[in-house]
Amino acid sequence: MNDTTATTPPTSTTSGTHLARRHGRRTHQEELFHETLELRKRAVYRKARSIPDAQAEVDVSVWEAIHRGVTDHDDLWDVARAAAVRQRRWATRQQRNDSLPILLGPEPVDPFAIVDMRVDASRAIRRTRDSGRAPTPQVVQWATHTAGLSAGPRLPGSVRMAGSRWIEKVRAQLELCDDVA
């Protein structure tokens, strides 16, 4: 009786890579991918720090490059950096597109609304002019100087403060008129 069956190892139906992983061994590609972990994290940190899914995009790009046969760390750095930049640009485009208003056709012009706005504006100006005293000549000079309509020496601080107070008062009155209208 031949007893060779007891000395031969049992055949397994599982694949070799499955057994290798179960015993803690990795393929060369998996080992290279594991070695590039810091490189991938650094690329995301430098190029796409706050972009969601940038790490996943970089990981996928590096994994695909390794499967294509790229083994040089400098080349893998280029792949990771390009993937991070691509993800950052994509996210920026999406954010910009989300913030754009939906463009609709122009609204039809209502001539009565235009007349009403002009009447309200002239009424607000008249109310502002009549409600308070007119600015002093120094404040008028400050306003023309500030608007760039006149040139001259710098005005004293008291005139500038009076002009600023007068402008704020007029703005407040006009805002009240806008709120009513």
Image (cartoon, rainbow, N blue to C red):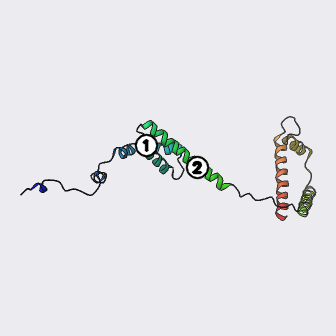
Q: Which amino acid does label 1 sit on?
A: Arg
Single out the residue that lies furthest toward the front. Answer: 1
In whole angstroms, how far apart are the C-alphas of marks 1 and 2?
A: 24 Å
Q: Which residue is drawn at 55% across and 44% down?
A: 85
Tell me the crowding category of disc 1: few under 14, some 14 to 19, or many 20 or more residues within 10 angstroms, Cα based.
Answer: few
Left or right placement of residue 8 versus residue 142 in this view: left
Q: How many numbered marks have been drawn onto this rendered protein structure?
A: 2
Closer-to-camera residue (35/6): 6
Left or right placement of residue 63 versus residue 90 in this view: left
Q: Are marks 1 and 2 in contact (CB under 8 Å)?
A: no
Q: In which quarter of the image is the C terminus?
A: bottom right
SS for dot 2: helix
Q: Quadrant of the N terminus?
A: bottom left
Among the two numbered marks 1 and 2 on one chain, the one whose residue lies closer to the N terminus: 1
Q: Where is residue 2 in the image (x, y as percent from the top left)?
A: 8, 56
SS for dot 1: helix
Q: Residue at x 82, y 61 (%)?
A: 107
Q: Where is residue 33 in the image (x, y as percent from the top left)?
A: 39, 45
Task: Kindly report which numbered mark, 1 or 2, lies closer to the viewer in this rendering.
Answer: 1
Closer-to-camera residue (151/17): 17
Tell me the crowding category of disc 2: few under 14, some 14 to 19, or many 20 or more residues within 10 angstroms, Cα based.
Answer: few
Mark identifier at residue 79: none
Q: Which amino acid does label 2 sit on?
A: Trp
Residue occupied by mark 1: 68
Residue occupied by mark 2: 90
Single out the residue that lies furthest toward the left. Answer: 1
Q: Which residue is drawn at 55% across and 48% down?
A: 87
Q: Where is residue 137 in the image (x, y as percent from the top left)?
A: 92, 44
| Residue 140 found in image quarter | top right
Q: Which residue is drawn at 58% across and 51% down?
A: 91
> Looking at the picture, does residue 133 appear above or below residue 143?
below
Q: Position of residue 60 (x, y in %)?
A: 46, 49
